[in-house]
């Protein structure tokens, strides 16, 4: 399908929103400690800020190489004169997991900061959003900040992520301060100083935090208002669930942003807040990708894979329950799995929007534009959370722009609906007359079609009655040429089962007494079914009756029949297979010839022998050449003559296996009479689960030597 070209105005609109988006992210930032970007960095556990004028400069983020010691605890580690030259170094902010330590444990971090008099003149303060998952912060040996209880084992530790801003008051105003932080973690996948410490004037830090809180609160307000607005829209029109899924999606992002921004800890206190915070943070991810997948499915169901969507939703429900059931030290280790499914939902949604845009679905291009911005912000947050890049958490800002585009779509749809309503209101009579005329026209067409159908049905009924009458006449003729009762024959007992495919069929048999102790049996099968096959059997009967008493051998019968059919009936393209058996009970011998007929079966002493064909079918060749064969026929031997319809019904699915199935069945009853065997075959065919509908004429004759 040819894609609809993107208009220049749409491109300009997208460009303006993208520029605004980047500007907001750069100016406002996001997570509290990450708004204090600074060009300065520590090296070897020392950070030189002696050249800065803290009365004029922005706050300084104490990032870079800190001194670090793991699994040891000593009160002396907080003192400024401690020799930490043998300590390891680690880049902050980061988890100590990057040093190949386990997430659970405790350790000390130290940094020497060189300052000047301007620092003490600026009304200095220190700020820390939190550390995983409890800490004590010392400045020149004095305890300044703490959150939770930083113990050396789980039983003595209490987690807390409450942000802290504290003025600094140190005696003698030294030109160097040593910041030492004891961190313990027994409740998260990663431990350490994962947030930067910030120093500067109290007013400058407060100002930056106020700007951050203002922008974040504005975004959170937009998210929760949008969620409430769309849920109200859903209750107004519950058949359309698009608003419901978008509301759930917005609520999930709001919940995630609210707890990641540490607002929960600022409002409430207590140890349980830590566990509630992480449960909300991780459960909101599962809720978010489930809501997003269902939202895309409701918008563009033809472009969205149903199995993919409901698989994401099912997994999302599981991941909503996991943080509620398991403790944080376990489920936080699944962050990569959470991110994987979140990424899958984003990629799937992006694919759906691309597909919908190419198919020119209504408003798909506008939604795609907003979604691209949102997807970039989500990818940024995922990489930032894993410390792959150091930017800021900006997903709520991306969602704000996505909501802006979504609101534009809603406005466009409401506008179109209003225009349609206005048009229908102004042109109601015209539309009613138009639709009434169309309805009358279609009604007239339907009546005409019904009349034509009735006339056609009458013609078919007349034709059916004529055909039924003709078939009935053909059946009368056909039944009279097929013997109904078997006369007594010397030394043999004959059992017959026949079942035509239609009222009349193409299978034929005849039994004739010859000289004393001799009986001739003829079985034939004409190609086709129904009337044409029945006419063929009549021809066979007429021609066979002329020659059956005058031919000494079976092969002679087939030779003369072939001459007749090839000479007089070749234009009918009618072919016949058959077998002629001469049974001589006086000399215990059988002489037979077979014209293209399936191999017949004789049972001797419980063993099966096949009477194979001795020439081609009648009517195929001018000089076919048939031969006679003989076989002994003794007391208690049994002979079975049949047409292909019998073994085809044994296995309607695989015709070629039907003959073998018939042989197996006859072998099973080899120690019984032909009459019992044929009755068993009849019962099997009537109850065969593989045979849903009969497809050919059925004929089988059993002969016992008695």
Image: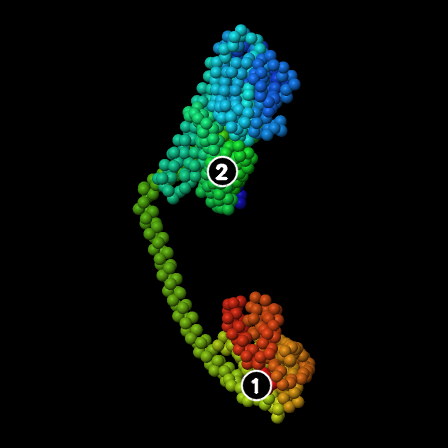
Quick one: label 2 or label 1, which is nearer the N terminus?
A: 2
In the picture, measured across the screen, residue 692 lies left or right of residue 514, that is left
Image quarter where the C terminus lies is: bottom right
In the picture, measured across the screen, residue 467 lies left or right of residue 422, that is right
- Classify residue 73 by image quadrant: top right
Which residue is label 1 attached to?
A: 493
Distance from the alpha carbon under mark 2 to that under mark 1: 81 Å
In the picture, measured across the screen, residue 243 lies left or right of residue 322, that is left
Packing grade of label 2 (10 A; few <14, some 14-19, many >=20) is: some
Q: Residue at x 34, y 43 (%)?
A: 424
Q: Position of residue 250 (x, y in %)?
A: 44, 34
- Classify residue 581 by image quadrant: bottom right
Q: Residue at x 36, y 39 (%)?
A: 235
Q: Residue at x 44, y 42 (%)?
A: 298
Q: Position of residue 640 (x, y in %)?
A: 60, 79
Q: Which mark is residue 251?
A: none
Give the secondary structure at mark 2: helix
Give the secondary structure at mark 1: strand
Which residue is label 2 attached to?
A: 322
Query: For the residues carrying marks 2 and 1, which lies nearer the camera in this image?
Result: 2
Packing grade of label 1 (10 A; few <14, some 14-19, many >=20) is: some
């Amino acid at each position: 399908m040819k894609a609809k070209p993107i208009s220049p105005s749409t491109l300009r609109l997208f460009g303006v929103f993208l520029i605004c988006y980047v500007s907001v992210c750069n100016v406002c930032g996001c997570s509290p400690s990450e708004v204090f970007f600074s060009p300065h960095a520590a090296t070897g556990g020392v950070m030189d800020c002696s050249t800065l004028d803290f009365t004029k400069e922005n706050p300084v983020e104490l990032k870079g190489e800190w001194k670090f010691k793991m699994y040891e605890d000593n009160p002396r580690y907080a003192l400024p004169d401690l020799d930490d030259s043998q300590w390891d170094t680690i880049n902050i902010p980061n988890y100590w997991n990057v040093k190949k330590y386990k997430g659970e444990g405790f350790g000390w971090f130290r940094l020497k900061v060189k300052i000047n008099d301007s620092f003490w003149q600026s009304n200095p303060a220190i700020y820390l959003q939190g550390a995983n998952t409890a800490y004590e912060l010392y400045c020149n040996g004095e305890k300044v900040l703490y959150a939770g209880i930083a113990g050396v084992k789980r039983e003595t530790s209490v987690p807390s992520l409450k942000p802290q801003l504290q003025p600094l008051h140190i005696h003698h105003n030294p030109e160097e301060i040593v910041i030492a932080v004891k961190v313990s973690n027994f409740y998260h996948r990663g431990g350490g100083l994962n947030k930067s410490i910030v120093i500067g004037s109290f007013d400058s830090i407060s100002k930056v935090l106020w700007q951050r809180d203002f922008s974040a609160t504005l975004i959170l307000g937009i998210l929760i208002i949008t969620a409430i607005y769309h849920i109200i829209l859903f209750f107004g029109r519950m058949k359309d669930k698009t608003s419901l899924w978008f509301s759930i999606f917005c609520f999930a992002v709001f919940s995630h942003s609210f707890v990641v921004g540490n607002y929960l800890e600022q409002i409430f206190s207590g140890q349980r807040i830590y566990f509630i915070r992480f449960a909300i943070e991780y459960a909101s991810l599962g809720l978010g990708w489930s809501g997003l997948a269902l939202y895309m499915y409701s918008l563009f169901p033809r472009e969205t894979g149903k199995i993919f969507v409901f698989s994401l939703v099912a997994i999302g429900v599981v991941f909503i329950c996991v943080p509620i059931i398991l403790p944080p030290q376990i489920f936080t280790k699944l962050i990569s799995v959470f991110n994987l499914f979140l990424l899958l939902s984003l990629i799937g949604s992006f694919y759906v929007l691309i597909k919908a845009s190419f198919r020119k679905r209504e408003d798909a291009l506008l939604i795609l534009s907003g979604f691209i911005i949102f997807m970039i912000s989500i990818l940024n947050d995922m990489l930032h959370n894993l410390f792959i890049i150091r930017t800021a958490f900006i997903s709520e800002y991306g969602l704000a722009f996505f909501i802006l585009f979504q609101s534009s779509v809603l406005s466009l749809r409401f506008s179109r609906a209003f225009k349609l309503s206005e048009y229908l209101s102004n042109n109601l009579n015209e539309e009613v007359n138009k639709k009434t005329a169309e309805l009358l026209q279609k009604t007239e067409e339907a009546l005409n079609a019904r009349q034509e159908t009735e006339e056609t049905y009458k013609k078919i009924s007349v034709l059916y009655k004529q055909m039924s009458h003709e078939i009935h006449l053909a059946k009368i003729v056909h039944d009279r040429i097929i013997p109904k009762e078997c006369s007594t024959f010397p030394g043999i007992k004959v059992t017959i089962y026949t079942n035509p495919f239609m009222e009349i069929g193409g299978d034929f048999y005849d039994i004739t007494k010859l000289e004393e102790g001799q009986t001739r049996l003829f079985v034939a099968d004409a190609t086709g079914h129904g009337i044409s096959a029945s006419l063929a059997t009549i021809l066979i009967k007429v021609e066979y009756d002329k020659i059956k008493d005058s031919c000494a051998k079976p092969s002679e019968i087939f030779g003369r029949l072939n001459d007749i059919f090839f000479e007089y009936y070749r234009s009918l393209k009618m072919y016949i297979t058959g077998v002629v058996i001469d049974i001589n009970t006086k000399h215990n011998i059988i002489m037979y010839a077979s014209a293209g007929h399936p191999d017949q079966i004789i049972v001797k002493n419980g063993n099966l022998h096949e009477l194979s064909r001795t020439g081609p079918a009648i009517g195929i060749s001018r000089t076919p050449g048939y031969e006679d064969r003989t076989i002994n026929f003794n007391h208690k031997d049994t002979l079975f003559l049949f047409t292909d319809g019998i073994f085809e019904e044994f296995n309607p699915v695989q015709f070629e296996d039907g003959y073998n199935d018939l042989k197996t069945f006859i072998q099973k009853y080899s120690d019984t009479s032909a009459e019992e065997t044929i009755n068993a075959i009849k019962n099997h065919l009537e109850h065969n689960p593989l045979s849903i509908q009969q497809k050919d004429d059925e004929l089988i004759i059993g002969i016992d030597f008695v």
